[in-house]
Amino acid sequence: MSAFLLPLLRNLGTALLTKTFGVWLAKLAAKSTKTMVDDNAILLLEGGLNNNPAQIETAAKAILKEFSKKA
């Protein structure tokens, strides 16, 4: 039984450490709040991880817009 369980746990642990799962988990946590700043911060992070300047710019502008509403 441990010959089956050990590789399964190892694969599950590897899956939990991937970039995709980390971003998904961060998005899930950000959606549980009422503000959009954290949602846009996750999009900013995702754009950086994907090396996507357009996504980074869009997310940064959205964050600044949210902060200007608060002031």
Image (tube, rainbow, N blue to C red):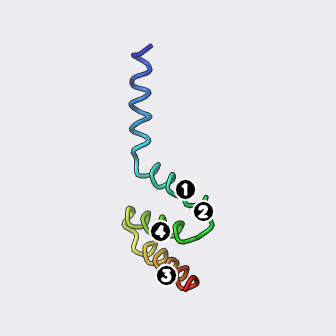
Using the numbered discs, state the Cα–Cα distance from disc 3 to disc 4 in whole angstroms: 11 Å
Q: Which amino acid, by three-letter code, is at mark 2?
A: Thr
Quarter of the rendering containing residue 3? top left
Q: Residue at x 38, y 30 (%)?
A: 10
* Label located before the other in sequence (3 or 2): 2
Residue hosting label 4: 41
Of pointers 4 and 1, the one earlier in the residue sequence: 1
Residue position marked by numbered label 3 in the rendering? 64
For the residues marked 2 and 4, what is the alpha-carbon distance in whole angstroms?
13 Å
Which residue, given by chain and number where applicable, does mark 2 sit on? 33
Q: CA distance from mark 4 to mark 1?
A: 12 Å
Residue depicted at 58% across the width and 84% down the height: 69
Could you say which disc has been placed on residue 29 in the image? 1
Tag nearer the camera, 2 or 4: 2
Q: Secondary structure at mark 3?
A: helix
Above or below: residue 66 compared with residue 23: below
CA gap, disc 2 to disc 1? 7 Å
